[in-house]
Amino acid sequence: MVKNKLYFEDVKDGQSIPSLVKHPTPRQLVMWAAASEEYHEVHYHLESAKAEGLPGIIVHGMLQISFLGQMITDWIGDWGTLKKITSTNRAIVVPDQDLTCKGKVIKKYTENDENLVACEIWVETAKGETAVKGTAVFSLPSST
Amino acid sequence: MTNEESVKAQELRNMLGRETPPLEIEVEQGNFRRWAEAVGDYNPLWTDPQYAKKSRYGYTIAPPTFAIDRGIIPLADQLIPLSPKFLNGGTEIEFLKPIKVGDTITTTAKLIDIKEKAGSTGKLVFMTLEINYKNQNGELVRKAKNTFIQVFG
């Protein structure tokens, strides 16, 4: 796998981040439950989900944050460093649909000798609803 | 109804500052592999030791959200029985230092804030947890905040 090196100077204010489409399946939710040791039944047991008033089993919030993280780390490559992610859940998300991770650069700045980029990031459901909305901050090397 | 809600909020307020006993996580390459398979994110920085050896780190690093839930859940499990109807209101994660294979990560979670607000269908109580993740050298490697929302109505 050869990755491009993204420099601070390559990033423009307002620029869109290359989007990432994920398609979580119930099997993937079980794998995530095991990997994260988060065994809340609403993520794999239909009756438990329905008892909590949900339409079906739901996708973990942290899995969706992980998808957003992947969008960022795929883009910034090996020389970029993810510093922070914030997120809030806006909608209930069921599996077996395309989830599209998107983002936009909102600010470039320098702090403590680090070149930082702040972005808005979000997850869109197949219906175009915003499921998760948040921000990310990462640092990049300078080309100069 | 109103009285009952305040009692609930008070019950939670009494838990402010409560900290979970430290939870230790022994970090293995297999943890990163299982995370990568679950997310479908096979970044070689966390999955390929040969590749990672030549990176600026010199070793595989943990993927961003690795072990975050393991720090949050023990305290959430103590709070949620008080509140069957809860929502995850938001998460904030700071990635401070790389986590590597062989590290022992110790997490502690603390209830740091309780707020009550009027919602459209009843009262909402916001519970904020702060979670610290330290390595065996005592360095803070991750810091997270998670807000759970209790709905009364």
Image (cartoon, coloured by chain):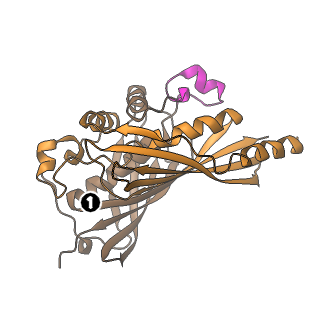
Chain colours: A brown, B orange
In this rendering, is residue B152 above or below A25?
below
- Residue A22 higher or lower than B141, as above or below: above
Subunit under mark 1: A
Q: Is residue A12 left or right of residue B56?
A: right
- Disc 1 marks a residue whose amino acid type is Ile
User: From what the image shows, is residue A55 above or below residue A104?
Assistant: above
Q: Position of residue A55 (x, y in %)?
A: 59, 30
Image point (26%, 33%), residue name: B30
Q: In this picture, is B83 found above or below B129? A: above
Question: On the rendered structure, is B43 left or right of A49?
Answer: left
Along the line of sight, the residue nearer the viewer: A93 or B78: B78
Asked if the stretch drawn in magenta spans residue A49, the answer is yes
- Which image quarter: residue A76? bottom left
Q: Residue at x 12, y 52 (%)?
A: A2
Q: Magenta residues? A: A40-57
Residue A94 % position (x, y)? 50, 34
Which residue is painted at 76% across and 43% down in the image?
A: B11
Q: Where is residue B117 drawn, in percent x and y? A: 75, 54
Q: Is residue A1 visible?
A: no
Residue, disc 1: A76
Counting the numbered discs, the total is: 1
**Helix, strand or loop for disc 1:** helix
Residue A102 seen in the current view: yes
Please identify the quadrant where the N terminus of chain B is shown.
top right
Q: Tell me where residue A53 appears, x and y as whole percent.
A: 66, 30
User: In the figure, residue B85 lies in which quadrant?
Assistant: top right
Q: Residue at x 50, y 46 (%)?
A: B108
The quadrant of the rendering that contains the C terminus of chain B is top right
Residue A138 within the segment the image draws in magenta: no
Residue extending farthest to the front is B137
Is B49 on the left or on the right of B135, as rendered? Answer: left
